[in-house]
Image (cartoon, rainbow, N blue to C red):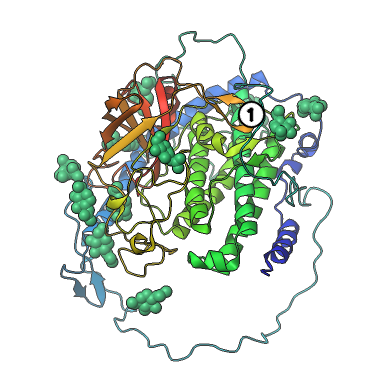
Amino acid sequence: MYSKIVATSVLLSGLAAAAPQGWNHHGGNQGEHQKGWQGQGYGQSAANGQSAANGVSASAGNGASASAGNGASASAGNGASASASATVTSPEAPVRTVSGTRALVSAPSVAIDQDGNVPGYTNADASFADDSVTPLTVIPTVFGPDSTIPAIETDAVSTGLFAAGEQRSSWVTGYTSHGPFSGTATTTGAVMNTPYIYPSGTIPTGPANPTATYYNTDGELQHNEPIPYTPYGGLGTNGSLPRYMVESDFDYESITLGLYQEWIELDAFNNAVALFSEEEFLRYGLTPEDVSLIQFMGQQEQGHATLLSNMLGETAPPQCTYNHPFTNPREFVDYQQILTRWGESGVWGFINHLDSREVGQLLAQSIATEARQEMIFRQMAGLHPMPVWFEAGIPQSWAWTFMAPYISSCPENTTRLAWQNFPALHVANQANINRFSPNDTALWERVDNRTSSPAVIPDQDESCVNLNKTGYGCGPAITHNRSEPLSFAGKQVLLEWDTPGKPVGPNDSYVTAKGGVAGEPSYVAWAAQLNLTYTPLTITGPNTGYTYQPNASVYEYGAPIVNGTMFIALTDTDMYLTPFNLSMLNPHIVALGVYQAG
Ligand SMILES: *[C@@H]1O[C@H](CO)[C@@H](O)[C@H](O)[C@H]1NC(C)=O
Ligand SMILES: *[C@@H]1O[C@H](CO)[C@@H](O)[C@H](O)[C@H]1NC(C)=O
Ligand SMILES: *[C@@H]1O[C@H](CO)[C@@H](O)[C@H](O)[C@H]1NC(C)=O
Ligand SMILES: *[C@@H]1O[C@H](CO)[C@@H](O)[C@H](O)[C@H]1NC(C)=O
Ligand SMILES: *[C@@H]1O[C@H](CO)[C@@H](O)[C@H](O)[C@H]1NC(C)=O
Ligand SMILES: *[C@@H]1O[C@H](CO)[C@@H](O)[C@H](O)[C@H]1NC(C)=O
Ligand SMILES: *[C@@H]1O[C@H](CO)[C@@H](O)[C@H](O)[C@H]1NC(C)=O
Ligand SMILES: *[C@@H]1O[C@H](CO)[C@@H](O)[C@H](O)[C@H]1NC(C)=O
Ligand SMILES: *[C@@H]1O[C@H](CO)[C@@H](O)[C@H](O)[C@H]1NC(C)=O
Ligand SMILES: *[C@@H]1O[C@H](CO)[C@@H](O)[C@H](O)[C@H]1NC(C)=O
Ligand SMILES: *[C@@H]1O[C@H](CO)[C@@H](O)[C@H](O)[C@H]1NC(C)=O
């Protein structure tokens, strides 16, 4: 029998010993109140006095964004030329060799005021560069003993400020059963209260924040700096004590959602490792080392779940019971590349709206890890690791809509969420990542009709999973260059959508609903990278229609907006929205789905 369980325990205890410092222990007295998810004394959270901080936050935030806007376009310009050059390079094109350096064919066009890095290097020469390849003559076959280097026995600090924080779930102690829920909900609907500030159901567009005025025209400091090397401004830079706790209902509901996400990942990663044999993983090109990486990712989730629990307090929800869609390792990695995509994008969507900058800080440090998981699952699924220039952010209700169908039940008294569950938008001809000819994808090649469920594996003579041919193979790899893309601008996209009112989520206790003011659907909104773009919807029958994949790039001559695993919504509007006000789309959404573009 496969000895993976033993390996898990060893790794787990190794990780527990190396667990990161509990940042919340550093705040002296205050730290004591924030000691952990089991601790008491969270009553004094959400201080309304924080509104002063909000004012400052808006000013610095917007100032930063104006200036970042400029920076972004300059740097994107460089990126543009790099990527554009890469895509026009082909084996047929003449490749010039200049002084030992290979020069690629230049891009047809580059962003304004940019020359592009490849043309700029045509005279490149490097005295150290040598065109010849050193032949491999020796491969090591004996691995030790090593040299003995100076070392001492060191004990881990176990008490005080520098001791490792307690893990909420160092072992899988939660519910491990899987399958659909078959009971009756005792509560239904999202957490809500009254009154609404805007009874119309939409938040009106306001003017720019009055403090959003900073603009630097001379490159000099505009204010006296508080101490040397420390420019004036920023938030939390004046010596005030950090407090790593949610500071509003918005923060609380966002981090609680994030914790639901960490738990489903923890369970899915552990579940796959427990379910499939080494041989089964190998059949899909995943080696025992890859399996260890998945195990390690599960352990990362223990840390993330602990961190988020600490920032919430004693009402932090526990792990639930899940109903995953996969039946083999390939379906697992496909499902995970989708699940971690909305896990990551869900956080990018709210992180900069949080009231608590401290929470945002720690959350960013966990979501950076999650982003790597997403990329690794894409690689394990044979997809291009990152066929985009930017990762999209989406509103919380979108992440919750995608996640809820995979949670079958949660323990009694589990903290409920305030976010919306939109009706599902299905892509009938969603590109099948397991085909070397994605054009040949038939209708409904998914293991089930939940929007994030993986593609089915076609017959062996149509599958790219075990195909070893550049441009066609899609087994696990650092990257693949698909000669036949999964999708392309102008592709007809066949859509079907659910009617609202469907029970969904833990214990079937949430109910899908369209946006509060949403009328008949007229548009398909495509959310990817930095953009929300629309195409017209043609309705062909009840809850059925089609559109065509848009042809738009983030920056001209650059990467198309639509690529990777991304998001689509049916809406009654084509209102203009940007990453920081994307959630204004919610009241107009009729249905929401996932699109496998690349
Ligand atoms: C730091 O700035 C915040 C506003 O951002 C203010 O409320 C607080 O009093 C300041 N703290 C100190 C120590 O100056
Ligand atoms: C969203 O923000 C953009 C600015 O980035 C603005 O032009 C647009 O009008 C805003 N949309 C709404 C509906 O407020
Ligand atoms: C439910 O949760 C609340 C808040 O954490 C707690 O006060 C209460 O004791 C819990 N009830 C049960 C039955 O666990
Ligand atoms: C959900 O269902 C499970 C299994 O029937 C049950 O143990 C649990 O108490 C239910 N949870 C809620 C919140 O009602
Ligand atoms: C896939 O379909 C598109 C649109 O009809 C077509 O342009 C393209 O050539 C097809 N791909 C292949 C590899 O045949
Ligand atoms: C998904 O839904 C479509 C149409 O509603 C149906 O034809 C198809 O069989 C369903 N797929 C699965 C796996 O249930
Ligand atoms: C894939 O094909 C190449 C060349 O045809 C060969 O060198 C390589 O060993 C093959 N790899 C596998 C995993 O079969
Ligand atoms: C990569 O794919 C493109 C088409 O998408 C093709 O033109 C190019 O030659 C491929 N490059 C390699 C190294 O296979
Ligand atoms: C997505 O990006 C990959 C890699 O750059 C490219 O080959 C593919 O054609 C792109 N897909 C779309 C839909 O643009
Ligand atoms: C996308 O738009 C550009 C510019 O209008 C055009 O050259 C290109 O052919 C379009 N691509 C598709 C697939 O329609
Ligand atoms: C995509 O978003 C970027 C950043 O906001 C913007 O500069 C660009 O114009 C947008 N592209 C399109 C096609 O809307």
For label 1, the residue is 252
| SS for dot 1 | helix
> What amino acid is at disc 1?
Tyr
Residue sitting at 67 percent across and 43 percent down?
305
Please provide percent x and percent y for residue 245: 68, 33
Instruction: Using the image as rendered, state which of residue 143 and residue 338 is in the foreground.
Output: 338
Q: Is 149 rendered above or below residue 7?
A: below
Q: Residue at 71%, 54% (x, y): give it.
A: 19
- Look at the image and tell me whether residue 557 can be seen: yes
Q: Quadrant of residue 250?
A: top right
Q: Horizontal placement of 307 versus 357: left or right? A: right
Q: In the visual, does 587 lie left or right of 305?
A: left
Residue 577, position as x, y percentages in the image: 36, 27
Locate residue 285, reporting x and y percent.
48, 66
Residue at coordinates 43% horizontally, 64% vertically from top-left? 477
Position of 132 relative to 48 (above/below): below
